[in-house]
Image (cartoon, rainbow, N blue to C red):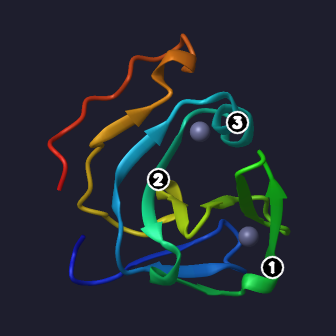
């Protein structure tokens, strides 16, 4: 990760956050992500403690499986986080400005949509 925390927000700005640690970029092509995001989910996997949320009261949490829940802004509907145990998957589309990240890994490629090719990856950082 960059020394500076990444900053992000939902579309309406009610929910803002910073991420100071994490691994990415990753993409998940599973059915849950497809249904939730309308396409694959591109994210940064971060320890929950490294994500600081401002406006957390505007988040609604949805249990998308037995093991995961997803947080979205109740006003604009932007899907920002997926929580799995003590890790948060932070949606990269919500980050402001350049992230300096490239895809390092793709998950559940076998269930991806047939309308795109899997984006190229670079070596893990
Ligand atoms: Zn919002
Ligand atoms: Zn997924």
Find residue 58 and name its label.
1
Structural crowding at the residue carrying mark 3, measured as other residues with C-alpha within 10 Å and reported as few (<14), some (14–19) or many (≥20): some
Task: Decide if residue 102 is on the left or right side of residue 122.
Answer: right
For the residues marked 2 and 1, what is the alpha-carbon distance in whole angstroms? Answer: 21 Å
For the residues marked 3 and 1, what is the alpha-carbon distance in whole angstroms? Answer: 22 Å
Mark 1 within 8 Å of ligand 1, using the beta carbon:
yes
Quadrant of the snapshot with the C terminus: bottom left
On screen, residue 114 above or below 62: above
Mark nearest the camera among 3 and 1 is 3
Mark nearest the camera among 3 and 2 is 3
Give whichever of 113, 93 is nearer the camera. Answer: 113
**Residue at the spot x=79%, y=63% of the render?**
76
Q: Residue 97 lies in what quarter of the image?
A: bottom left
Task: Decide if residue 51 is on the left or right side of residue 85.
Answer: left
**Residue at the spot x=77%, y=45% of the render?**
65
**Residue at the spot x=64%, y=68% of the render?**
10
On screen, residue 32 above or below 76: above
Find residue 101 and name its label.
none
Q: Which residue is mark 3?
A: 32
Q: Earlier in the sequence, mark 2 or mark 1?
A: 2
Q: Secondary structure at mark 1?
A: helix
Indicate the quadrant of ligand 2 in the picture.
top right
For the residues marked 3 and 2, what is the alpha-carbon distance in whole angstroms? Answer: 14 Å
On screen, residue 4 above or below 106: below
Q: Earlier in the sequence, mark 3 or mark 2?
A: 3
Residue 17 horizontal/vertical position (percent): 55, 80
Q: Which residue is mark 2?
A: 43
Q: Residue furthest top?
A: 114
């Amino acid at each position: 990760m960059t020394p500076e925390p990444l900053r992000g927000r939902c579309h309406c700005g009610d929910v803002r956050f910073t991420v100071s640690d994490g691994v990415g970029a990753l993409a998940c092509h599973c059915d849950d992500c497809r249904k939730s995001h309308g396409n694959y989910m591109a994210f940064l996997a971060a320890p929950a403690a490294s994500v600081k949320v401002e406006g957390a009261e505007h988040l609604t949490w949805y249990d998308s499986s037995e093991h995961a829940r997803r947080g979205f802004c109740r006003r604009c509907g932007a899907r920002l986080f997926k929580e799995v145990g003590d890790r948060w998957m932070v949606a990269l589309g919500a980050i402001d400005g350049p992230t300096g990240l490239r895809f390092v890994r793709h998950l559940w490629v076998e269930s991806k949509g047939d309308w795109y090719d899997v984006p190229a990856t670079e070596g893990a950082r």
